[in-house]
Amino acid sequence: MAKRRKYTAALIGTGRIGFTLGFDKKREQPASHTMALKANRRIRLIAGCDTDRSRLDRWGSYVKTAALCPDTANLFASVVPDIVVVAVNEESHMRTALDVIQARPRLMILEKPVALSMEQGRELAFAANAKKLPVLVNHERRFARDYAIAKDYISKIGRIQTVNARLDSGLYVYNPEKEMNGEYSLLHDGTHLVDIVQFLLEGDSSSAGEETVLYNPLLSSIYYDRERDGETSKIVRSLNVHFESERCPDVNLFFSGQSRFFGFEVEVIGTEGRFRIGNGIFEFFTRKESRLYSGFYSLLPDTKVVPPKKTGYFANMIQNAVDFLDEKAPLRSTLQTGLSTLQVLEDIKALF
């Protein structure tokens, strides 16, 4: 058997998602781009880039053979990688991604959200399409085995009647003062909530993710944080929005900010079953003859469905990049997927 080639990779952004979450002992590892890239035998990590020299030096002490670059100009003058990972803060996504597009690697891996706005997102897509650069967006749950199990289980619960998805975060749901850096939960973690709901409701065709799955947003409730100078503040503490989709007429997204805990969960209810999945949640129920009432059916735990020992959420994302470059598989989370999720978030913001 012929030896398969290795792909070279460069990382831009050596902060939490780029590097240091890989040392979190409570998280399933690999939990950062650095650790996931190093763990894949088909990838050779050849360079790191960060404007923060202390962070870059710490990264360099871990990836000793890689070039250390203080900016993208220096990076692309030094190396020509096959894969470039953009793991910078939200406010730097656009500028950094455009630099990568001009350098024309074989693949760009872009952290979520793809941009701060649809205007920026469309500009990014236009530039990437002009250079014919494929983009893999790290909406990590699309690659996780537990969510794959949930998506497959949908066919077993009959007609989908209701979807309830909830995010609780310490950030405000929305703060207009943070528009330029994206430090509000509707964008920061809400992109994950919206994306995974769309993933679960998408069909299985190759065009899945190409269009927005959720439509007709209706504001069910909203709570602003406080009044300012006698006027209602635009800082949102909690928000409940109703959507429709082709597969379900009743999709409810709930966002709660300034919470003293982090919560993420999705519940899908069908005519013959239901499931709940999220951070630390993996519950599946199926229709069986009731133990309580003669002639009735109840939903009982489906003991045949067991959680995977590891979800592989980060490792599978990097493997998808390798499989794509090998021309063995399409990208499972694309720039268009990210834009469709961003569009839903903008539809929500238009309601308040």
Image (spheres, grey):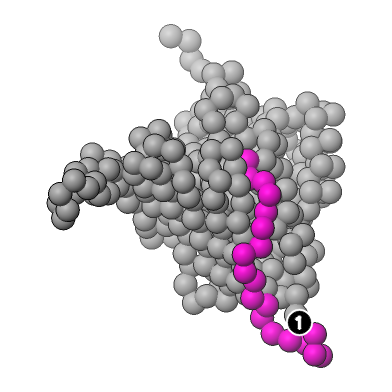
Q: Is residue 322 left or right of residue 134?
A: left
Give the image quarter of residue 52: bottom right
Q: Which residue is mark 1?
A: 232
- Of residues 223 and 99, the one nearer the viewer is 223
In this orientation, does residue 317 appear?
A: yes
Residue 289 coordinates in the image, percent (x, y): 19, 44
- Of residues 188 and 153, the one nearer the viewer is 153
User: In this figure, what is the number of numbered marks?
Assistant: 1
Which residue appears at 34% of the width and 41% of the height? 272
Furthest-bottom residue in this view? 229
The magenta stretch is 213-231
Q: Main secondary structure of the magenta part?
A: strand
Residue 200 coordinates in the image, percent (x, y): 50, 41
Amino acid type of the residue tagged 1 in the rendering: Thr
Q: Is residue 313 left or right of residue 56?
A: left
Which residue appears at 22% of the width and 43% of the height? 288
